[in-house]
Amino acid sequence: MARRKKLFEGKAKILYEGPEPGTLVQYFKDDATAFNSRKKSVVDGKGVLNNRLSEYFMNGLNMIGVPTHFIKRINMREQLIRQVEIIPLEVVVRNVAAGSLSERFGIEEGSALPRPMIEFYLKNDELDDPMVTEEHAVAFGWASQHDLDEMVALALRVNDFLSGVMLAVGIRLVDLKIETGRVWDNDFQRLIVADEISPDSCRLWDITSNRKFDKDVFRRDLGNLAEAYTEIARRLGVLPSNITHAVKPHVIN
Ligand code: UDP
């Protein structure tokens, strides 16, 4: 097959031109980054696992009527997706205090929150993805108030869906991050869930032991990241058949 045109390369994924107008191919790399790429590693098998896990979550969302960019998985590392115009805001939903919320407000990690909390962050590596308010987003033209309302509605539905799916396999969804993108169906425009949903972008803790199965394993050197993601995939029954054991991550710089 002819080499596809690369359109964009990010930290964990590459986007290629798709086979039809309005489609893209999303390729999952094994690269792991944290702290805005100040910590980097290659984790063998991570891309394959995240491709499967994102397929599983996005498929489920599509099936319950939460629109996503996911069309189908093509192979071990690639999926066909709808091309969207990415809204430059990350939407975080939190159920339990952790990470930057705990640091910013001195709330102990693991404290249950009284209701799901929503935060917006600007996607801007030079600025270290600062947290922004809805007022900033509208005033600076990153999203309209209507977009923000749609983003909150989508994020809450993803949060409820993922909380239930993970609880069924003994895992608590602590928080998650989604990205959204704009699509046009004739003259009608709407936002859909884009990017990926994987343990790279959520916090997943064992319901009884609180053991972490997400990117904090890498951020905080808590063990083997591929092993943690493999355990999630195993519990969900989506373990790729050729991944029988996880490989130790090696630091490249
Ligand atoms: N998150 C993400 N990408 C980012 C920042 C955060 O996927 O660029 C996810 C992160 O994995 C966690 C949630 O968003 O599940 C909340 O992250 P937090 O603000 O606590 O960030 P941290 O300081 O821990 O990166």
Image: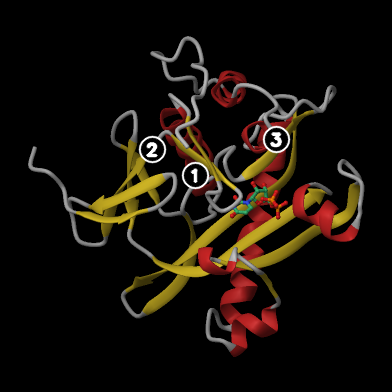
Q: Residues within 10 Å of mark 3 (few under 14, many from 20)?
A: few
Tag 2 and tag 1, C-beta contact below 8 Å? no
**Disc 2 and disc 3: Cα gap in Å?**
21 Å
Across and down, in percent, residue 144 comes to: 56, 83
Give residue 71's mark: none
Residue sticking out furthest to the top: 244
**Disc 3 and disc 1: Cα gap in Å?**
28 Å
Q: Amino acid at mark 2?
A: Lys
- Residue 202 lies in quadrant: top right
Give residue 58's mark: 1
Across and down, in percent, residue 141 comes to: 53, 85
At mark 2, the secondary structure is: loop
Number of marks in the rendered image: 3
Residue at which label 3 appears: 220
Instruction: Residue at 44% x, 48% y: name it.
Output: 11
At mark 1, the secondary structure is: helix
Q: Residues within 10 Å of mark 2 (few under 14, many from 20)?
A: many
Front disc: 3 or 1:
3
Is the residue 73 above or below the residue 38 in the image?
Answer: above
At mark 3, the secondary structure is: loop
Give residue 29's mark: 2
**Disc 2 and disc 1: Cα gap in Å?**
18 Å
In the displayed structure image, the side of residue 73 where residue 140 appears, left or right: right
Instruction: Residue at 83% x, 54% y: name it.
Output: 103
Can residue 145 be seen here? The reply is no
Of the numbered discs 2 and 1, the one sitting upstream in the chain is: 2
Of the numbered discs 2 and 3, the one sitting upstream in the chain is: 2
Q: Amino acid at mark 3?
A: Arg
